[in-house]
Image (cartoon, rainbow, N blue to C red):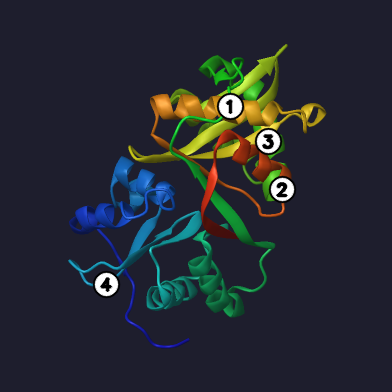
């Protein structure tokens, strides 16, 4: 690995500079910005370290190092510095995710040391909508209530297993995953259409700042797929999110999922960047 300036762990003295850097691209960096805005840079509260590249007062890039490794505004030299630090500490994350150029460069440098990944998704269009949806939303899509956690959980588990390739119940029986779903419900960020006690459509806003929010976990019951349920459901989620969470709504999708991409385009989403994910 080529020598480059080292990455450093950021602290409270860097907070204003970190927030300013993340504000440069509020859509691509929604996840990290949402975490930092909520709890600051203290690793214990954040559940992660924020690595910076550049001296204090001249911060160029950063990387979130927790359950996910997420580079932000990272050019070649910064990627090398983050890869060097990640290599030296060993793999602690379950995925690399973020803007494709940085993620794929990071993985190229780490692969010889970390070994093979379970899956590499090298092109995931990042899509966003900053105006009203282009179609009417499903009026039956609504916020999930706290007492409906056991109604929502089966759909969440199926979605996660389909998307990630492993069940969220593995390891701790799903207690951490359930707690996360409960948190999204409690904060008004879980949307669903429920019929006769069964979820037929759902989506959550997984990360949010005042500027932008990111939708995740979009799922339609298998018996209703390719009938427009997801398209109308997403239009309702966009309107609800814009009214109560943030003016810009984004998501990222696998490039091979053409049905989903067409559905989001009908709602009014447009491609604004490209993400990549490396799953372990």
Closer to the camera, 118 or 214?
A: 214
Residue 111, horizontal then vertical, whole percent: 60, 75
Q: Report how far apart the C-alphas of labels 2 and 4 lie in the structure.
A: 40 Å
Which residue position holds label 4? Answer: 54
Q: Report how far apart the C-alphas of labels 3 and 1 lie in the structure.
A: 29 Å
Which residue position holds label 2? Answer: 258
Mark 4 surroundings within 10 Å by alpha-carbon count, few (fewer than 14), some (14 through 19), many (20 or more)? some
Q: In this view, does 11 lie to the left or right of 248?
A: left
Residue at the extreme bottom of the image, as rendered: 2
Residue 237, horizontal then vertical, whole percent: 54, 28
Which numbered disc flags the more N-terminal residue, 4 or 3? 4
Which numbered disc flags the more N-terminal residue, 2 or 4? 4
- What secondary structure is marked by label 3? helix
Q: Nearer the viewer, mark 4 or mark 1?
A: 1
Q: Nearer the viewer, mark 4 or mark 3?
A: 4
Look at 77% across and 33% down and name the residue there.
Answer: 226
Closer to the camera, 29 or 87?
A: 29
Badge number at residue 157: 3
Q: Report how far apart the C-alphas of labels 4 and 3 lie in the structure.
A: 41 Å
Label 4–label 3 contact, CB within 8 A = no
Q: Number of labelled discs?
A: 4
- What secondary structure is marked by label 1? loop
Q: Report how far apart the C-alphas of labels 4 and 1 lie in the structure.
A: 45 Å
Badge number at residue 65: none
Look at 54% across and 58% down and name the residue there.
Answer: 274
Q: In this view of the protein, can residue 55 be seen by the observer? A: yes
- What secondary structure is marked by label 2? helix
């Amino acid at each position: 690995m080529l020598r480059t300036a080292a990455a450093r762990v950021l602290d409270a003295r860097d907070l204003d500079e970190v927030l300013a850097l993340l504000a440069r691209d509020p859509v691509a960096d929604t996840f990290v910005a949402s975490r930092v805005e909520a709890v600051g840079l203290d690793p214990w509260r954040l559940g992660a370290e924020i690595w910076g590249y550049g001296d204090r007062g001249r911060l160029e890039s950063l990387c979130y190092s927790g359950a996910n490794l997420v580079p932000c505004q990272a050019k070649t030299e910064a990627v090398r510095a983050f890869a060097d630090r990640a290599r030296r500490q060993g793999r602690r994350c379950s995925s690399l995710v973020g803007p494709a150029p940085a993620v794929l460069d990071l993985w190229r440098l780490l692969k010889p040391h970390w070994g093979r990944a379970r899956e590499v998704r090298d092109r995931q269009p990042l899509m966003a909508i900053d105006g009203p949806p282009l179609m009417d939303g499903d009026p039956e899509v609504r916020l999930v209530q706290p007492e409906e956690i056991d109604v929502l959980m089966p759909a969440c588990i199926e979605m996660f297993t389909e998307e990630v390739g492993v069940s969220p119940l593995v390891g701790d029986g799903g207690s951490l995953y359930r707690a996360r779903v409960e948190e999204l419900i409690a904060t008004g960020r879980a949307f669903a259409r429920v019929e006769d006690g069964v979820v037929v459509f759902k989506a959550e806003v997984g990360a949010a700042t005042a500027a932008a929010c990111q939708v995740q976990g979009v799922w339609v019951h298998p018996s209703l797929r390719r009938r427009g349920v997801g398209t109308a459901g997403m239009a309702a989620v966009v309107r609800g999110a814009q009214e109560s969470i943030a003016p810009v709504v984004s998501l990222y999708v696998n490039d091979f999922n053409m049905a989903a991409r067409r559905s989001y385009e009908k709602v009014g989403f447009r491609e604004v960047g490209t993400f990549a994910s490396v799953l372990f």
